[in-house]
Amino acid sequence: MRNPIKIYDRIKREAPKVPPYTCPIIDEGQAQLEELRQLNEALRDSAIYWKEAAQDLSVELGAAYRIIDDLESDE
C-alpha cells in the first residue's frame, strides 16, 4: 500500500510555483475600477442630495410667492 503523505509530498515538491501576482496590469486595472466605482457612488449620492435640496427650495419659493401674492392682493 502506498503512503498518501509521501505521494502528496512528491507532487507538492514537483509542482510549479504559483506567482504572487498573476498579472499586475489586471490587478492595477481592478484597483482603478474600484476607485472609479467609489467616485461614481459619491457622485450619485451628491446628485440625490442636490435634487432633494432643489425640491425643498422650490417648495419654499412657492410658499413665499403665495405669501407675496396674498400681501399684494390685500393692498
Image: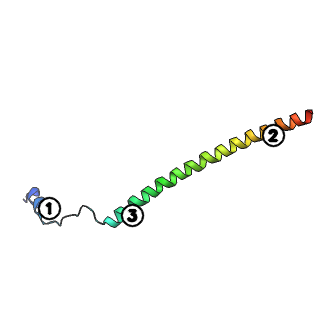
Q: Foreground: 7 or 26?
A: 26
Instruction: Please give the count of numbered marks on the rendered protein.
Output: 3
User: Which numbered tag is attached to residue 12?
Assistant: 1
Colouring = rainbow
Q: Is 72 placed above or below 4 here?
A: above
Which residue occupies 8% across, 58% down? 6
Q: Which residue is mark 3?
A: 29
Q: Quadrant of residue 55?
A: top right
In this view, the mark in front (2 or 3):
2
Q: What distance separates the C-alpha of mark 2 from that of mark 3?
A: 53 Å
Q: Residue 53: x, y in percent?
A: 65, 43
Q: What distance separates the C-alpha of mark 3 from that of mark 1?
A: 32 Å
Which residue occupies 82% across, 35% down? 67
Q: Which residue type carries mark 3?
A: Gly
**Which secondary structure, mark 3?**
helix
Left or right: where 59 falls relative to 73: left
Q: Residues within 10 Å of mark 3 (few under 14, many from 20)?
A: few
Q: Which residue is mark 2?
A: 65
Q: Check the picture and name the quadrant holding the N terminus.
A: bottom left
Q: Which residue type carries mark 1?
A: Lys
Q: Check the picture and name the quadrant holding the C terminus.
A: top right
**Which secondary structure, mark 1?**
helix
Q: What distance separates the C-alpha of mark 2 from that of mark 1?
A: 81 Å
Kindly check if marks 2 and 1 are in contact, taking CB atoms under 8 A apart as contact: no
Which residue occupies 42% across, 56% down? 34
Left or right: where 50 falls relative to 64: left
**Which secondary structure, mark 2?**
helix
Q: Residues within 10 Å of mark 2 (few under 14, many from 20)?
A: few
Q: Which residue type carries mark 2?
A: Tyr
Q: Residue 68: x, y in percent?
A: 83, 37
Which residue occupies 87% across, 34% down? 71
Q: Which tag, 2 or 3, sits closer to the chain's start?
A: 3
